[in-house]
Amino acid sequence: MKSLKLQCRLLLVLLLIGLLAGCSNTPSNEPAAPSEPAAPNEPADTEKPADTEVPKKIGSVEFITGSATGSWVPIASGISQKINEYYDGFPVTSVPGPGSLGNPPVIGSGDSDIGMSYAPFLIAAVAGKAPYEEAYPNLRAVCAMQPNVLHFIADVDDSVTSVQQLIDEKVKMTLGIPPVGNASTYLVQTIFTAMGYDNLEDIKDYGSNVYYGDTTSINDAWSNRQINAFVSTLNIPASSVQESLVGRGGKILSIDDKLAEVLIKNEGYNSYTIPAGTYSGQEEDVETVALPLVVFVSEEMDEEFVYNLTKSIYENKEYFETVHSSYVEFDPEKMTEGIGIELHSGAVKFYKEVGLQ
């Protein structure tokens, strides 16, 4: 009996030892401590460089201007240089072109990409009116640049101070203009059309006359008193106008409000004031009109490209002034004025961003 009790006690001790041993191997209920994150490859206070925009690739773009010796070539070259900063490989090149009268059909027919002209020609080209035989409704404006100011110069009685007065009073004159078909002749015709003369030759009905010749011939005719009036559309101050006024006298006639209103509404001119003292003997301001130089493309031109073109012109006035003196008159805030035709969608996009649309 005692041995049986002893055996039971030994068995109980062994069970207790087994239980204690099992408890020592039980895993803890506490969660394991999180591991430390791997150290970054670069220090936390090191800034990553800003992404640099890679110049985009684009096919070659041709920018047509006027004669090789004219002022439009360097003007377009300056614009081309700035737009090329947006693209790889300098794709935009400026080349001589047919000028303000001939450029719209070239762009409208797709034979070139960017052009320069004036609002009256663009308006006529879009509508298919004279001097154009075909309509180019796909022409779109990019911007207006520096103004070309209308100088109507005449050596007439002191009482005559305006173009409207000159015509209304049928003051006799011999008007010097370039040959028919010349851009300047067309611009002169727009003025006389606004005053009721569909043909310049009609002024002969009251004893006046028209003298046709190139710039040199007209200057000589003025100096020799073969003519007593001529018209120039130039940047101011124009050295040729100064020479004409000093050499012979005469004055710049103003454009009356009524005439200016018609020219602005129908032909895309802007009002303009030639400040007193701009030319010799000019003691008062002269109210006239001006035609801003218009950069234009076709409707089919890539929207992003036209956006960048417009932006590059808007942002670089100071640079452009180093390219050509006429840029002094360029006002980026007036890039939507005097364009004559619908803006390209890429230009509209940019102008909305800067509050000009």
Image (cartoon, helix red, strand yellow):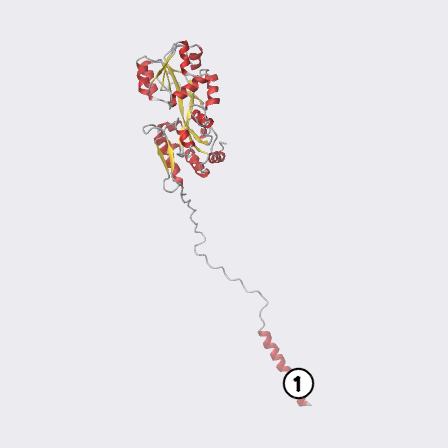
Residue 292 lies in quadrant: top left
Task: Check disc 1 and report the residue beneath it.
Answer: 8
What SS does tag 1 mark?
Answer: helix
Q: Residue at x 41, y 16 (%)?
A: 200
Residue at the far right: name it: 1
Q: From the viewer's perspective, is residue 40 above or below residue 351?
A: below
Quarter placement of the N terminus:
bottom right
Q: From the viewer's perspective, is residue 55 above or below residue 123?
A: below
Residue 320: x percent and y percent? 37, 32
Picture mark count: 1
Res 20 visible: yes
**Is 248 or 107 nearer to us in this picture?**
107
Residue 291: x percent and y percent? 42, 24
**Is 13 or 233 nearer to us in this picture?**
233
Side of 347 relative to 215 (left or right): right
Residue at the far front: name it: 133
Residue type, numbered disc 1: Cys
Q: Residue at x 63, y 85 (%)?
A: 10
Res 274 visible: no
Residue 121: x percent and y percent? 43, 25
Residue 245: x percent and y percent? 34, 16
Label 1 packing within 10 angstroms: few (<14), some (14-19), many (20+): few
